[in-house]
Image: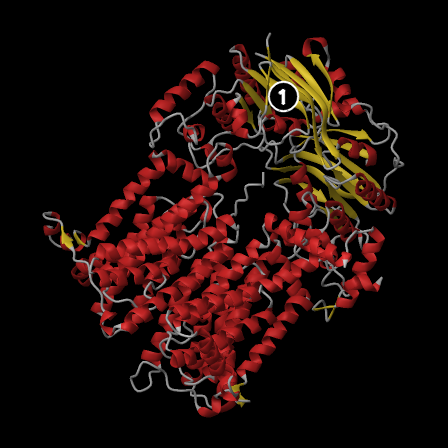
Amino acid sequence: MAELLRMTNISKRFGSFYANKNVNLEVERGEVHTLLGENGAGKSTLMNVLIGLYQPTEGTISINGKEVRIASPADAVAQGIGMVHQHFMLIENMTGLENIILGDKRHKSLMLQKADDRKTVEELMERYGLEIDLDERVGEMSIGMQQRVEIMKVLFRGAELLILDEPTAVLTDLEVQGLFDIMNSLTSEGKSIIFISHKMREVMQISDRVTVLRRGESVETVRVADTTEQELADLMIGQKFTESVYEKVEEAGAPELTLKNVSYHPEVKHGGLKDVSLTIHRGEILGVAGIDGNGQTPLAELVTGLISPESGEVTGPDGAKIALFSPEAFIGAGVGNIPEDRNKMGLVGDMTVAENLVLKQTTSDRFSSGHGAWLKMGAIAEFAEEKRQENDIRCTSVNQTARSLSGGNQQKVILARELDGAPTLLVAVYPTRGLDIGATEFIHKQIVAQRDAGCAVLLISADFDEVLKLSDRIVVLFEGEIMGTYPGANPPIKEISLAMAGK
Amino acid sequence: MTKSKHTLSAEERREKTLMVLTPVASVLLALIVGAIIIACLGKNPLQGYAALLQGSLGDLPKIGKTLERACPLIFTGLAAVFAYKCGVFNLGGEGQFIMGGCATALTVFGLGLTGPAALALGLIAGIVVGGIWGLLPGIMKITRGLNEMITTIMLNYVAMYFMEFVFKNLFSDQGLPKTPAIPKDGRLPELLSAHIGVLMAIILGIVIWYVLFRTSFGFKIRATGMNQTAARVNGFPVRRLVLLSFVISGAIAGMGGSIELLGKAPYRLADGFGSGFGFDGVAIALIAQLNPIAAIVVAILFGILSTGGTMMQSVIGVPTAIIDITRGLIIIFAVAGMAMIKLPAIKAFIASIGSKSKKVEANA
Amino acid sequence: MDIFITALPTILKAMAMGAVPILLASLGELFSERGGLVNIGLEGIMAVGAFVGFAVAKVTGNLWMGLLVAMLAGIAVNMIYAFCTVTLCSDQVVTSMAINILAPAIALFGYNLFVGANPANATGEQMASIAIPGLSQIPFIGDALFNQTPVAYLAFLLVPCVAVFFSRFRAGLSFRSVGENPQAAETLGINVVRMKYVACVVCGALAAAGGAFLTLCYTPIYTDGIVMGRGFIALATLIFGRWNAFGVLAASLLFGFFDGTSVALQAQFQAAPIMFFKMIPYVFTIVALIFFGSRSAGPKASGKPYLREQR
């Protein structure tokens, strides 16, 4: 088969951090080429370079053997490259046809040539077996059909190489089969596809070749026919620390919070929970592993009182059923929360560091007098200064706005606030996302220290290394369901990574 | 250690300075544009501005008049500040102001009150009814998700016609379209040629500053206004806080209307009572960047422009609408300026100037 | 009921008259919000349109010239808004509120100069109605509906034009995409910033035309505050017209109907306190919003600033 795309020694540096380092990728005509790697392995960066959103620091791209420069998404389109983003770029209030022809300039007329374009689109639909209701509003379409609209947008603009970024992440099994049929008919017509996925089974089923990325580097390209799932998983995950720097607890304390057959919008695969049962014990870190968007968000919201379960029950330490789900009640019961999005949910960016540190305690006797009416400014300032030094929050003053701090220091502010007063349950969601090594280490140490002090910790993270490193027990969440529970000491890594992929 | 408590980084300081400088520059720029317009009319702008100052601050009675003119604006400005601090865009200051005035008039004339009773009960009625008039759009927002900008404006017109009903039908002064004057002994006493409502307004401003920045209630209001999601996650009763801010904002404006009626000549409701004060209050709050103390200052500036404008008109013969334009320009410049200093490109440019000047300092 | 029947022609006449300025402003806002810009400054732009239309018509003696220059003035005022919100990315609500304060001041200033120079200028020209032969002969409703000023006919004619623009024209489709999802629009090669400026031009022109209608066709004088909240009612009209040209027409007519009813009732019950009738349109607006006021139908990205660098 003829070579269509060759990316040679691509490096992309952000500051001192290499998101891609000497990555090589070569795609042939008519093949499905999978890009495999964990979160943060550099897949998105590489694709953003290919479609012109990023300029590579080093390296070259050639198409059909000719070196090209892709300076903008428009250049990429002109070169016949089209991307279907994981988060669709669709306009929900328009019909399928309108989304497909939007912005296209093939006609000279000022009027839309819907009839003419419809014919073109219908021909493409026929040819590649893409079923789209062209007159339905995109917002009312199934996710699968929305995706087909996205693919059609790319085909309508004459793409030869399609990039599908985790296209199966949002689909049901049946829809996945439909997508694979489409992919097969596309490749049989000579189009090439770069397929991005974590799901081993799917990768084995649909790909011709696989390039594995790890920590920003391309590890190897293999033919699927010559490999096994086990081998790919090994390549993707590499040598893991199985010996954690932190001691693992095997004997946990009494149960702090128990979920029994809890469901929340179970019909939504990537935003719901299905029949989840788990117990968080005192003096234990329970790690929730899983690919992003498999129910982590509702789980976190549930155990912090933001949402209430549709069915099933949640019981507290005394075994009593919790009836009232409100953040206020949960905070009162001693739940500390390091939320998923620190800027949106954790901090009030325009308030000062000191104010954010006392956000939850303004009515406590410590920081206000007159039954929580008047703020004790002195006590607040003193407390803030104390916390600043204790947690090494780097700021010129605690009167600086929280927004102006670096991510690591913002997270330290949240941590300092949530750990003050010794919570009985600490919920940490992606606690080190986007942080540097130093801040990450600090936060890990603090979480372990809480466990040692007897706090029950629920750690939810998409960073598998982090889960392995900290957890005393690991559960895997996949499409809202618990796939299995594993010990934290000497965890069966391969088994867990397959569970994360839904196997 | 203690030294670091109140020091800010160079960047922070620069930002703070710019935040203060922008409105000041906006005022100056607006005055310059005003001067150009005056010059274009063939008049002498310097002479005009001299008359403006003379007419507003020339002697004690004039200062008193200026402060009395500023008084309702302080109230509507503070009402706007309080609402916006909680993320509520209350444009109904005028309606709440008018309803406050109406409630006072109805209480005083309806019950035939005189003396301190008229004053006290009238004022309380004004505050309560203003609060209720603020509560209505609050309920509509919380239960039906209605945009408060539209509902508060509509309620302004309802209030205006209701006031017309009060001064034409209910308590018309001998069939004329105005109510009788508040009895002399029921009016606000004077202090240094201005009624004490001015003092009350200033004290209220300080109280509001204190509530917003020194009490846990104010803390929650501010947190909710700046980040509703975080406020909810951190256990604040967001809906209740939003509703309360509607009510308090309305009560402040209502108190303003009540004081206007009880304190300022002609002590009666008539056509035009409270007209435009709501929007002026919005402008004041925005120029003051939602700081209650700054809002008092800006309101007094507006008062100076208004009373001085009349003098300017009579001395150099330009229409007072020039003052309205100047006011409009101040707010446009302030809004544009505030947005500009937040643009990434402009920020980088300012930072580069800052670091350059520092280098020069270091070299010298 | 009898009273209502006899009053019907009056109501219908007033309905059509009352609907036009709101319809025009609301259609302008439709363009603005479809382009992702919430502009609550309609009231101010209408005031400028009302004054400029009045003054230019008086000076030139040409009512159409008045309308045209009013529209240009509306565009000029709205360019301040466009520059602040699109180029400087300022808050749209705050900026348009500032326009609401500045624009009427400009109108009042102009009026002071204009009438101050010559008191005879206080009363302006008025556009004559044109009866459509045949239709206007229909008993009872003919005169009310088919004996309107040309501007009113044009305004009603504009409705299908706007609808066709948004559904049939390439630019209309691109326009809508900008208000829904500017990022997606940009990836498809649509110039988001230019679209937003165009939206502001159209919005300024139409809102000012709505204002000019007040002084050219409704009453021959300009007074401060002549717009009487119609700019804000137009915002509400857009909401219960569901961001759709025909919906906006229906909502404007409904508003006009209540406006007309209020006028008719005032004429019927002269002894009653007429201010309660005058409240009707405003109360009706609130009630209508309570029942049909969900904002969910609006353009998705409306009100949000768009910075191109944010990817």
Q: Is residue A14 above or below residue B297?
A: above
Q: Extreme top residue here?
A: A1
Q: Quick check: C90 left or right of B175?
A: right
- In the image, what residue occupies the spot 66% across and 71% down? B210
Q: Quadrant of the N terminus of chain C?
A: bottom left
Q: Judge by depth and name the residue closer to the eye, C175 or A105.
A: A105
* Coloration mode: secondary structure
Q: Position of residue C199 (x, y in %)?
A: 40, 46
Q: Quick check: A272 left or right of C95?
A: right
- In the image, what residue occupies the spot 22% across and 49% down? C153
Q: Judge by depth and name the residue closer to the eye, C290 or B185.
A: B185
Which corner quadrant of the image does residue C226 belong to? bottom left
The residue carrying pointer 1 sits among few (fewer than 14), some (14 to 19) or many (20 or more) residues within 10 Å by Cα, namely many
Q: Quadrant of the C terminus of chain C?
A: top right
Q: Quick check: A407 left or right of B68?
A: right
- Could you say whether the residue bearing mark 1 is in a helix, strand or loop? strand
Q: Quick check: B81 left or right of C228?
A: right
Number of marks in the image?
1
Q: Which chain's residue wears label 1?
A: A
Which corner quadrant of the image does residue B211 belong to? bottom right
Q: Judge by depth and name the residue closer to the eye, B7 or A58.
A: A58
Q: Position of residue B76 (x, y in %)?
A: 50, 71
Q: Amino acid at mark 1?
A: Ile
Q: Is residue A164 visible?
A: yes
Q: Position of residue C148 (x, y in %)?
A: 18, 54
Q: Is residue A305 above or below residue A195?
A: below
Q: Judge by depth and name the residue closer to the eye, A229 or C200.
A: C200
Name the residue carrying label 1.
A61
Q: Position of residue C105 (x, y in %)?
A: 39, 66
Q: Extreme front residue here?
A: B364
